[in-house]
Image: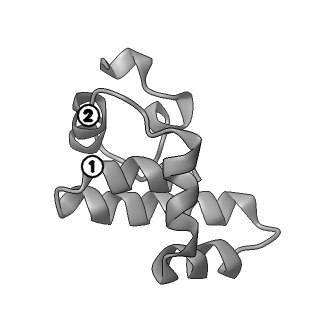
Amino acid sequence: MNLENLPAFVRESQVLDDGDRLQLSAFGRLPDEDEVDEIRSLPEVRDLLQAFIGDESTRNTHLQLKAKDYLQKGDVAMAWKTLLL
């Protein structure tokens, strides 16, 4: 996947930098819906989703921050899954 094909919310993110976008674009494919759903029960993800019920903007910012953390650890698959929640 090239940078231009990244979803708009990733390309326009104020949280993710160009290095993050480059890592995400190099992954090759987006996780499917089942793969994304699998992480909803992880404590750190579940807590984020529950903490910002009703405040989608803040929730998305925190999910992007969590994805950035996964990218720093080299876990691009988890970063994508988190971004696609």
Give coordinates of residue 67: x percent, y percent: 38, 58
**Screen quadrant of the N terminus:** top left
Residue 62 in view here: no
Of residue 45 and residue 33, the one placed in the foreground of this image is 33
> What is the image's colouring?
one colour
Specify which label sits upstream in the sequence, 2 or 1. 2
Residue 83 versus residue 65 in the image, above or below: above
Locate residue 7 relative to residue 69 in the image: left or right: right
Q: Look at the numbered disc 1 and give the secondary structure of its residue.
A: helix
Residue on which disc 1 sits: 76
Kind of residue at badge 1: Val
Which quarter of the picture shows residue 25? top left
For residue 27, which numbered disc appears in the image?
A: 2
Separation of marks 2 and 1 at Cα, in angstroms: 7 Å
Kind of residue at badge 2: Phe
Residue drawn at point x = 60 percent, y = 57 percent: 60
Residue drawn at point x = 55 percent, y = 37 percent: 9
Count neighbours of disc 2 (C-alpha within 10 A) and say few if under 14, some if 14 to 19, many if 20 or more. Answer: some
Residue drawn at point x = 49 percent, y = 76 percent: 42
